[in-house]
Image (cartoon, rainbow, N blue to C red):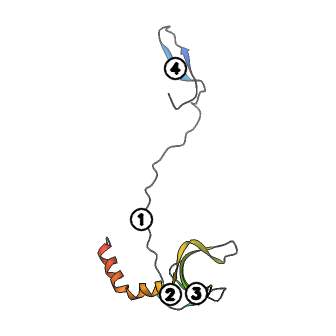
């Protein structure tokens, strides 16, 4: 069945044997939007991080120390239920312009973060071997 749901009407021409099928509505005067191809999604953009601004710990409104990892990412050190957590999280800005933590992120205990630091050279080697350039 045709996707066009408008009924077609047979219109007589001068010859009785020939019929011309035309849509019931005449669309001759209407303009149509041209369909264009959708551009392919571009590769992820590399974010430049200003090393001078990330080397110094800053304080947020709760008094927790944090380091900027990019325009929307932070590494913060906070206390939760008598445990120190290293929080790597995306942030968004609310209507007042204040930075608020988003859903995307991870909180590591001191032990988990220390494990990463202790194995940093092996992690760097694994990154080098798996990078595609």
According to the picture, the residue beneath numbered tag 2 turns out to be 110
According to the picture, the residue beneath numbered tag 3 turns out to be 83
- Tell me the distance, in whole angstroms, between the alpha carbons under discs 2 and 4: 77 Å
Q: Counting other residues with Cα less than 10 Å from the Cα at mark 3, is it few (<14), some (14-19), or many (20 or more)? A: few
Q: Position of residue 36 (x, y in %)?
A: 47, 47
- Tell me the distance, in whole angstroms, between the alpha carbons under discs 4 and 3: 78 Å
Q: Does residue 65 show up?
A: no
Q: Is residue 23 left or right of residue 127?
A: right
According to the picture, the residue beneath numbered tag 4 turns out to be 21
Q: Position of residue 85 (x, y in %)?
A: 55, 84
Residue found farthest to the bottom = 56
Q: Position of residue 49 (x, y in %)?
A: 47, 81
Going from N to C along the chain, the mark reached first, 4 or 1, is 4
Identify the secondary structure beneath mark 1.
loop
- Against 90, residue 33 (above or below) is above
Q: Counting other residues with Cα less than 10 Å from the Cα at mark 4, is it few (<14), some (14-19), or many (20 or more)? A: few
- Tell me the distance, in whole angstroms, between the alpha carbons under discs 1 and 2: 34 Å
Going from N to C along the chain, the mark reached first, 2 or 3, is 3
For discs 1 and 3, the disc positioned in front in the rendered view: 3
Identify the secondary structure beneath mark 2.
helix
According to the picture, the residue beneath numbered tag 1 turns out to be 43
Q: Quadrant of the C terminus?
A: bottom left
Q: Does residue 60 show up?
A: yes
Identify the secondary structure beneath mark 4.
strand
- Tell me the distance, in whole angstroms, between the alpha carbons under discs 1 and 3: 39 Å
Identify the secondary structure beneath mark 3.
strand
Mark 2 touches mark 4? (CB < 8 Å): no
């Amino acid at each position: 069945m045709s996707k066009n749901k408008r009924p077609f009407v047979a219109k007589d021409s001068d010859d009785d044997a020939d019929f011309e099928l035309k849509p019931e509505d005449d669309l001759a005067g209407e303009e149509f939007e041209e369909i264009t191809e959708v551009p392919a999604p571009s590769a992820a953009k590399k974010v430049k991080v200003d090393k001078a601004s990330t080397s110094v710990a800053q304080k947020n409104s709760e008094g927790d120390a944090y380091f900027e990892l990019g325009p929307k990412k932070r590494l913060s050190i906070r206390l939760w239920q008598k445990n120190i957590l290293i929080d790597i999280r995306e942030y968004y800005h609310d209507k007042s312009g204040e930075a608020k933590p988003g859903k995307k992120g991870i909180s590591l205990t001191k032990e988990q973060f220390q494990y990463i630091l202790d194995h940093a050279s092996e992690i760097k080697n694994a990154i080098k071997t798996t990078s595609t350039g």
